[in-house]
Amino acid sequence: MATPSESLHGTVAQQRNLLTRTLYKPLRALSDRCAQVWGDRATMEAALQTAFPSVPYCKFLYVLDAQGRQITANMSRDGLLEEHFGRDRSDRPYVREAMIERDALTNSRGQHYQQWGDLGDGTQATDFVLSAAYISLRALRPSLTAIQFVRAASGEVLGFVGADFALRELPQAQALYEDPRRPRRVDADYPRADAPSGAARLPSKMDAQIDTVIRVMEELILVHGVYHVMLHFSSSQAVVWVVDDPFRYRLLAINELTNPDICLAYPKCPYPTNALVPAERVRDILDNMRTLRSMEGRFYLRTGTVNVFNGMVSLSFSSDSSHYLPYEEFLKMDYSFWIDG
């Protein structure tokens, strides 16, 4: 087992700095080329095709105008994908980040709104934004986008070069972070003491972002060696056990569970061949837990657990009842059994 790394957030920051240093130069060169031929779609797409091999780990390259609308096709490993031309990406989180940065720079009259990323050689990654990780719309997996501004000779921002990446294909931490030993208290969403008997659950912070939490958990299990997950829906936290460090658990708070960047802090680990839960059923199990949690009624799911090695799912409800069952039975059970039974 590798020596534990520093903190979770410190490890994520290290990985993001590494990515900035890896991606900046090829994307800067591409943006300079696009600026020279701005508005000529065919020539810009030819530039994307030429540059694609120089952008490591990239899934898609494309060019956006200043409003976030795509003015080229997507360049992919399989060639140009024409259906993406004209796509409006202005509402996507990575484009919003870039636009906020651009507008802040404009309003500060050329002064740096933020300290650009350090390239390690005394220079900075100017006009480069590495987005926070997000869940992709199509694959529903943690993804990340690098944005490089395209500037005219006058300094005006003409648009952006975008490069999309799947987190699972990017370099990951080489050692697990060290989970700090410190007291923590997280209050659950139980009804108040003066609430009527049988009161319905109060929405938790995890409930508000449950889709992101479920997708992050899925990625950690399938790609990063997490084999046992305990999701505390009521108190908005999770406990995970990792194959590379099986005797210690790691506690993830809601701000970490809703940040797909944390996947960068876990070394890659092949899904275990001796797991009883097939990899293709992990999503189904987690999705079913989400469905159970969201059902209305006097009894609601507080905690859901899955262990991929023994193939067992455990569920704890507000009625103080707990259930342990093989994942196959969990996936085929009628949900009304849990609420009414």
Image (cartoon, rainbow, N blue to C red):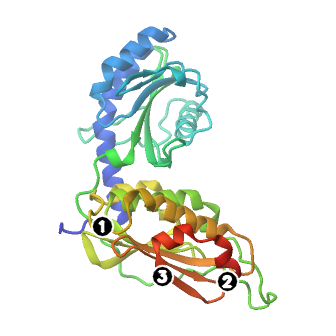
What's the residue type where badge 1 is placed? Answer: Tyr
Q: Are marks 1 and 3 in contact (CB under 8 Å)?
A: no
Say which quarter of the image contains residue 162: top left
Mark 1 vs 3, N-terminal side? 1
In the drawing, does residue 32 fall left or right of residue 185? Answer: left
Q: Is residue 65 left or right of residue 276?
A: right
Can you say which quadrant of the picture contains the N terminus? bottom left
Residue 184's tag is: 3
Mark 2 or mark 3: which comes first in sequence? Answer: 3
How much space separates mark 2 and mark 3, taking CA atoms? 34 Å
Percent x, y for residue 245?
26, 73
- Considering the numbered disc 2 on the image, is that residue within a helix, a strand or a loop? loop
* Residue 341 or residue 189, whichever sits in front: 341
Q: Residue at x 46, y 49 (%)?
A: 141
Residue type at mark 3 is Arg
Left or right: 174 as drawn, with respect to 199? left
Can residue 204 be spotted in the picture? Answer: no
Q: Position of residue 335 (x, y in %)?
A: 64, 71
Question: Label 1's element?
Answer: loop
Farthest residue to the right: give it.
196
Whether residue 235 appears in this view of the structure is yes
Q: Which residue is mark 2?
A: 341
Percent coordinates x, y for residue 328 in the rendering: 47, 69
Alpha-carbon span between mark 1 and mark 3: 18 Å
Where 98 falls versus 209 (above or below)?
above
Amino acid identity at mark 2: Gly
The label nearer to you, 1 versus 2, is 2
Q: Which mark is residue 69?
A: none
Q: What mark, if any, has residue 177 been given in the picture?
A: 1
